[in-house]
Amino acid sequence: MTTLTEKLSTDMSIHNLRRMFYLVTPSETKFSTIEEVPNYTDQVTGWFFLLMALEYLILWLKNKEDGFALNDTITSMNAGMLSQLLKFGGRTGTVCLYVKFYEHYRIVDLPWDSTWTWVLCFLTQDLAYYLGHRAIHEAGVFWSFHQMHHSSEYYNLSTALRQGCVQELGMMWFDLLQSTIIPPQVFLTHRYLNGLYQFWLHTEVVGNLGPFEYIMNTPSHHRVHHGRNPYCIDKNYAGTLIIWDRLFGTFEAERDTEPPVYGLVTNVRSFNQLWCQFFEFKELGYDKGQMKTAEGEELFPTFWDKVKAALYPPGYFPGVKTKWFFTWLCMKDSEEGIPQIEDNVQKYNPKIPFWLNCYCALHFVMLLGIYVHFSEFRTTMPTSHFVLYIAFLVLTMQSMGAFLDKRSYAVWLEMARCFLTYAYLYMWSADGANGSRLTHAIWGSSLALMKVEWEIAVTRRLPMKDGANQTADNHDRLHIGCRSKVDEAPSGLIVSSSGERDDATLSYSQISCPMWLALISIACSANASS
Ligand SMILES: [Zn+2]
Ligand SMILES: [Zn+2]
């Protein structure tokens, strides 16, 4: 069984490090079949962690710890894991389709082992990335596929891992354009390398890189891409080469006088993984079409108007000028309707007790270990296990998000998660089936603790559920940016004027139970593995 530490130690080769900067030669990245192409993303996990730690150390030495927050980083890394969960052994739906398209529609047979084919694909993959990336920013509801990547108010290496879990569905069509000429194994290699190159762009530690900035995409250029300042909107879509932005008129240099402020135009202000991933589909796909003016008139009255609301640029409203680019409409003036940055920028960062941070961090490390195990064996495990793993991983992410958001239901979700995990271990694990004393003791004490917890919660009349649902009512709101626009905090949150949630919603008694359960779960796994 591959453990997290074993995996990390095998990842740490200079070979793998070079791949993260596209510093490879054609000869060492040529493969005769698509099956031989390694999952490069999977192989650099160790470097991801080391470079993130190094970046944090530098920020700390520079007294810039506010460039990092544990809750934000956990959410970003959970998003990275979630986006990988939907891929099978690194061979995504795109790759399967690509192979089919290549078999049926290729117009030329380029040799897979030619350096020229390699160089050509370096360029076509980068152009396809530019087009796909631009489309999922500008083509209406397609923005929902990608907004997750921009939803962090921080800009550090962990932001690179914050990926939309269904983003693939929005970008694949542009990758497939290459299937008319590029052999699948060459395409897949460059697809990995192009994605990995973008990891190091997500940092504020690297400044201007001089002449390098003319041709290559750099941290400075990509900071602009993540900015929500009006001048940053819909700019610098590049993957590896910035030349595409310069060519198609979407380039913008970073301004020292107006440094980028990161995040969505109106931030989502939540660490609820599934909410962050999917809320925009409803907002752009439905809510926008239902909006009304202050007088109560519909902004998009007819069916066709509602289709326009969903498929025209996210910032589109009747009267706003648009223009065609490739196959979609984009804004003529990308700054139109984008608000200026507020004077006193307050990042969403609810404070939770130190030991609860430790609890979340501990479970996050455990989650990473389970994820590594899952990714190692997911192609060979039975479907029932596959589904259970995904359910466990998603439930854990949701529970963690609820704690980080200081949700009143967090403790109940966590208890349900622990309960279900114990039930699984008790009923199906080898140790549970044998019914050892320890397992029975754990089972019994878990139930007893939950019972005690329930009594405490009821007698103290603590909030047991959240009020309204999370759907923001947009009907009477007119302002909608090119980015997301949830003006209210999702339900169940008690937000003070400073953006901090009320601590009363999360008492010690509510949190104590999961702490105990966590300790018991560690004892349980230690017992199961002994
Ligand atoms: Zn983007
Ligand atoms: Zn980015």
Image (cartoon, grey):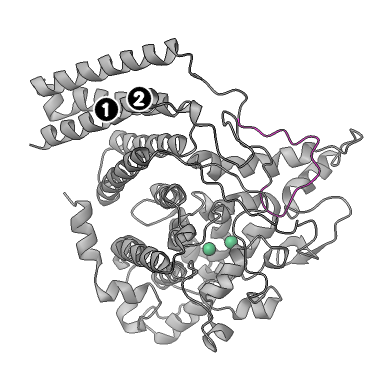
Query: Could you tell me residue 278's position as x and y percent?
Result: 57, 42
Q: Which mark is residue 265?
A: none
Q: Residue at x 30, y 80 (%)?
A: 28
The earlier-in-sequence mark between 1 and 2 is 2
**Residue at left 52%, top 21%?**
465
Q: Is residue 107 visible?
A: no
Q: For the residue with label 1, is its CB less than 8 Å from the closest atom of ligand 2?
A: no
Q: Is residue 307 above or below residue 392?
A: below
Q: Quadrant of residue 510?
A: top left
Q: Residue 517's spot in the image, x, y percent?
A: 27, 27
Q: Position of residue 212 (x, y in %)?
A: 52, 86
Amino acid tagged 2: Met
- Residue placed under numbered mark 2 in the picture: 415
- For the magenta stretch, what is the residue range? 470-484
Quarter of the image for residue 478 reads top right
Q: Residue 221 location, x and y as percent?
A: 58, 74
Q: How many marks?
A: 2
Give the secondary structure at mark 1: helix
Amino acid residing under circle 1: Leu
In this rendering, would 88 be left or right of 217?
A: left
* Quadrant of residue 329 within the rendered picture: bottom right
The question of residue 474 being in magenta is answered with yes
- Label 2 residue SS: helix
- Name the residue tied to disc 1: 517
Q: Residue at x 69, y 73 (%)?
A: 250
Q: CA distance from mark 1 to mark 2?
A: 8 Å
How many residues crowd mark 2 within 10 Å: few (<14), some (14–19), many (20+)? many
Q: Are marks 1 and 2 in contact (CB under 8 Å)?
A: yes
Where is 124 relative to 429, above or below?
below
